[in-house]
Image (cartoon, helix red, strand yellow):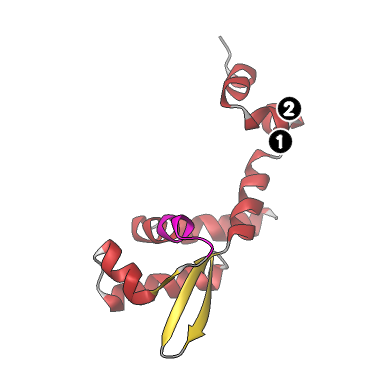
């Protein structure tokens, strides 16, 4: 992961709707959901949802597969984990293993 890709991913998630969609797809991993299920769950108009899904797919946050006349969307958990790794790589002076325990991470980063 590099800064440019991380920026692209954050830009893709900067919409509240896209963040809701991504979190819903993470919740339904690994099977994902078809567009109609996402639309119903989040009470979004299909045309509005389509716009957001296209942007997320373009950024690589979401994968889509055709199932007959439906499209199934899945959160790209590999990309999500890479983004988390990128964000925590320098945690606690280059010791990201400390970040895995919230108590330890809090202790290393607090200035109290």
Outermost residue toward the bottom in this view: 68
Query: Within the magenta stretch, is there residue 68?
Result: no
The quarter of the picture where the C terminus appears is top right
- The residue under label 1 is 90
Outermost residue toward the right in this view: 94
Given residues 87 and 29, the one toward you in this image is: 29
Relative height, residue 48 to residue 94 (above, below)? below
Given residues 89 and 24, the one toward you in this image is: 24
**SS label for mark 2:** helix
Given residues 91 and 20, the one toward you in this image is: 20
User: Magenta residues?
Assistant: 23-30
Residue 56, given in percent of the width and then of the height, sits at 48, 68
Q: Residues within 10 Å of mark 2 (few under 14, many from 20)?
A: few
At 39% across and 61% down in the image, what residue appears?
A: 21
Relative height, residue 29 to residue 67 (above, below)? above
- The residue under label 2 is 93
Left or right of residue 12, residue 15 in this image: left
Relative height, residue 100 to residue 48 (above, below)? above
């Amino acid at each position: 992961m590099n800064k440019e890709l991380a920026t692209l991913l954050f830009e893709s998630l900067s919409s509240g709707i896209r963040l809701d969609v991504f979190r819903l797809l993470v919740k339904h991993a690994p099977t994902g959901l078809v567009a109609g299920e996402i639309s119903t769950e989040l009470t979004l108009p299909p045309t509005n949802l389509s716009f957001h899904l296209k942007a997320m797919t373009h950024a690589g946050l979401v994968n889509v597969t055709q199932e007959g006349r439906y499209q199934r969307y899945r959160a790209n958990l590999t990309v999500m984990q890479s983004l988390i790794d990128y964000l925590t790589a320098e945690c606690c002076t280059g010791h990201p293993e400390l970040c895995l325990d919230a108590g330890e991470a809090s202790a290393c980063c607090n200035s109290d």
